[in-house]
Structure formats: structure tokens, C-alpha cells
Image: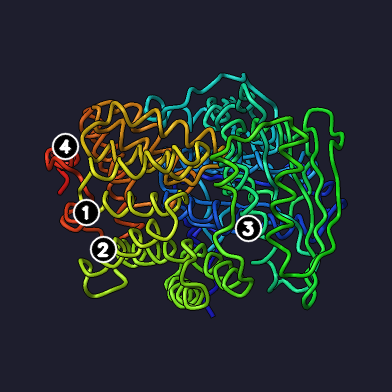
Amino acid sequence: MFLPTMETQRVERRLAAILAADVAGCSRLMSRDEEGTLRRLKAHLAELVEPHIATHRGRIVKRTGDGLLVDFSSAVEAVRCAVAIQAGMAQRNRAQGDDSRIEFRIGINLGDVILEGDDIYGDGVNIAARLEALAEPGGILVSRAVRDAVRDKLGNALEDRGERTVKNIPAPVHVFRVAGIAERSAPLPALPDKPSIAVLPFANMSGDPEQDYFSDGISEDLITDLSKVSALFVIARNSSFTYKGKTVKVQEIGRELGVRFVLEGSIRKAGSRVRITAQLVDAESGGHLWADRFDRELNDIFATQDEVVQKIVGTLAVKLTQREVKLLRRGTRNIDAYESWLRARDQLGRGTREGTAQARLLHRRALEIDPHFASPSAGLTFVALAEYVNAWRDDPEAGLNEAERWARHAIELDDGEPAGYVALGNVLVWRRRHEQALVPLARAIELDANYAQGHGLIGMALMYAGRAGEALEPLATTMRLDPHYPNVVLHLVAQTHFSLGQYEATIRYALDRINRNPNTDASRMLLASAYGHLGRLDEARAAWAALLQVNPAFSMAQRARVLPYKDPADFQRIVDGLAKAGLP
């Protein structure tokens, strides 16, 4: 039998960019909360880390318990991926307490590796691992080879950290730190000049997760009622609910949201009885200003909510206007209609086709029980709009007609409820009746100055109407009222800057949106076009390639048909930027 000698065996080698990552202080985190840490880590990997690796065409070689070893064919893509991961983690960690933050350390090297099956070995891998061990939590260190390969191709500076002697590597390794990552996350907001409050989601103490819709609904109603008080600054539901199920100090919540007061509590619903506990906390000192417990019949829930609002307003020494007293009235006093509406709102908020279909049935059920209840009618507008935007119905125009009918019906039922006006304004934007849309949206803000979504829609309407210079202020107001704003707000800001010809700002906000939502194709379209306008052709083509990886069926014709620009030249500007880079 022929046995190959060492000289005849062939070792397969190639050049690769290797990214090594692990969780800083993982043992400490696991010792404090093993199950919670593992759950959060899995969520970060599935929702942020792995999508970014796929987007930047990386290959996960192996998982190491609390870390990853990833192989890239490009050093530029490896560093871009690392920056996206660390920026995304910085954003996610803003809602976490110091004791529960998961922070990655990342090291990247460019070097020769030995291939053996799906695994890789050699000094190229070992140096990446040593750099990762030297990195600070949330930081990225790269070797000189990586620095030389990515020089002038990133928006991040590379700080020279000198040569370091590392274990099992004969020669010192020249180390560089990737700067400018933390700056991607927004600074903590300043306190407003009037009493400011965040209502945290009340804990469901019923022992049945299916009852979450009820405790969440009560919390959301309290936010809605308090936000109608013009003398208060009230954080939007989206930001308050980022703390659901998390143990975070009230002082930290106050700093992150930029508020002085926090309302927290719990709800236990059993049969026809409900118990609500609530406490108002000074987020600066952590001291309780007011606390109470309410044991009531379920039918008394509306009066109980009114009482909680009045207690808070009284404690904060805020005076209601006569109009605000009227605005705080409930849309229904029928508990069955109210519960059906709460379930509908919960289903619609899931953003799925199935949830939207359920929301339609539940909203209609609420209206059957109480035909004078305006909120379900406004809700049916958002159901029809979701079906239109997502192409979930065969006749889009009929969907918009239905949406407008429900919005106008909501206003007829209750002309003091802001949701009906926001619903109508939203429909009119999509119908390209931009100036008309601004009228009901302005009325919604008049009724509820803290309506974050209303301010955002005004910004969107102005941008699509060709008044981009006026759009940035309402969008900034949205971001202040909702500090953990949905990532689509970043896209609207990027889109507004693009319409103004401010391409550097477009790139910054589009990249921030991509960091938070790697699967966005809309922001990648803007990014590629902005790079094209600036003559950064390689980056434009890379952004377009990433877009097609996210959505291979992407169609510019479909976007031209759906995006409601008043002036077609505004959309043509996007096409022109792509054309400059030789893209379709």
C-alpha cells in the first residue's frame, strides 16, 4: 500500500480576514442570572449579530459558547460587520441595567490560514483571538495588516495602540483600535422644562401570559390619557415598553428617557375582579411620591384609570384645562367592547398578516358591541393601511378607500379623539394628498401635544410633499418623545436629508438604521444612491449588492409606484444616484 510522505501531503491555505468575538465578563453575568443571560445572548445573536454576518458575507466557522469565530474574504467587510455589531449592541444596551448588559469584545486579523474541512487554523486565527482578548468591552482591535487593507475605506478612525507581545506569537503584534463606535448611539436626552413622566408597562400578576394584553392595554391607556395633558411631557408607549420584563433601576430609566418621574405598577385580573397597584417615583432620588392599591369590580376599571390619572396630576401639581378634562373621558364604558379593542390593538401591534386579520375581526366585534366607540374605527384604518402597504389584498385602491372611510367615521364618532385624525392624515399621505393630510395631523397634535406618532407623520407628510426643510423639526420631536424610537424613524430622517441633497447625513442615518435593522432594503437603496452622488462608487456598489442579498426581488419600479412623493423628481434623484454608480 502506498503511504504518502510528509512531502507529498498537501496543506490547503488561503488568505482570510478572521473575526473573533466573545462576551466580556460572561462568567460573572451567568453567575448572577444564568437563564436570563443565555436568553438575552441568544436574542442578540439571532436578531443582530448573525444577520450582520450574513449581510457582510461572513461565514461562522465555530461557536465557542459565549463567542464566535467568523471567516471573511474581505477585511473591509469584516470591520464593517464588527462596527455594525458593536453599534447595534450599544443601542440595545441603553435599555439594560449595568448588571445585565451583554458586551462583545472583537478582534480582527488578516492573515494566512490552514483549511481543514469547515475549520481553520494557524497564526492568522490565533492573532485574531489574542486581539479579541485585548479589546475593551464594546470595542474592536485590529492588526496592522487589517489597518493597511481598510485604510480610507471606513468612516471610522483607526487609533494606533502600539506593539503588543501576545501569547504564543513570536513577533509583537501592532494593534489599532477602531474609533467612533460609541458615537453612533444617541446621547442621553436632557430634562424638559415641564414635569416629565414615563409610564412603564404594568406587570401582569394574573399568572396567565394570555392576560398580557389587558395589563399592557391599561398601561397604554394611562400613557394616552396623561399625554393629553398639555402641562406634562409624556414618553411614548414604544420607549416605555422597551423595559417590559426587565429589571432596571428607576434612576437609569429616568436618565435614558430624559424624564423626572416614572409610574410603575401591577395588575391582577381574576374573574370579575381586578386589583391595580401603582406608584409614582422620583427618578432622580428613587423616592416614592405616591402609591395606592385599587381593588375593584372589572366594570369599574374606567373609573379606576381616571382616578389614577387624577392622582398623578394632583401629585405633580398640574392644572387641567376645561378642554383637557373633557378629553380624558373614556371612549366606551362597555367592558366587553373595551376588552375586544385591547385584544385587537395587541394583535395589530404584532405586525404579521395573521395578527392583522385577527385585529380586523376584533375591532369589528368591539364596534358591534358599542357602535359609538371611536377607537376601533380608527384601528380599522390602520388594519386597512397595513394590508395596503404590505400588498396583503388584491385591490390596493379599495383598501385605501376603506381606510379613509373608517378614519372619517372615527372622527364623526368622537371629534376629540386624536387617533382618528392621525388615521386620516396617514391615509391621505399614501393617497398623495399631502397638503390635505397636514390638516388632520395638525389637529391631532393640537389635541395631544405628546403624540409621538403624530409628529412623525407630520414630518413624513412634509418630506413627501417636497417640504423637506420643514420635516426635520417634527421628526426630531418624535425622537425626543420616543427616545427608543422605531428604526423606521431613522429611515425617514435619512430620506429627508437625501431630499435636501445632504448626502453625508443621509449615509450616517441610513447606516444607523441598517445597524438596528440589517434586513432593511429601503435604507440600503438610499445608502447606495447617496454614495453614488458623492462619487464613492465602490461603496455604492457594495451597498447595492447587500440590498440584493437582503431582498433579491427588490424592484425600483415597485418603489416608484408606492412611495408617495408629490414631485416625481424627488424619487428620480434616488435613481440618478444609482445611475452614477452604474447601477439599475
User: Which tag, 1 or 4, sits closer to the chain's start?
Assistant: 1
Label at residue 431: 1
Quarter where residue 297 is shown: bottom right
- Please give the residue where the numbered disc 3 appears in the rendered image: 43
1 vs 4, front mark = 1
Callout 3–callout 2 Cβ contact below 8 Å: no
Q: Residue 178: x and y, percent?
A: 54, 28
Which element carries disc 2, helix, strand or loop?
A: helix
Residue 176 makes an appearance in the image: yes
At x 52%, y 69%, the residue is 344
x and y percent of residue 494 in the render?
A: 35, 36
The answer to whether marks 2 and 1 mark residues whose Cβ atoms lie closer than 8 Å is: yes
Picture disc at residue 400: 2
The amino acid pointed to by label 1 is Arg
Three-letter code for the amino acid on which mark 2 is drawn: Leu
Do labels 3 and 1 touch, CB within 8 Å? no
Tell me which amino acid carries mark 4: Arg
Per the model, the C-alpha gap separating discs 3 and 2 is: 36 Å
Q: What residue sits right under mark 4 in the picture?
A: 573
Quadrant of the rendered structure where residue 304 is?
bottom right
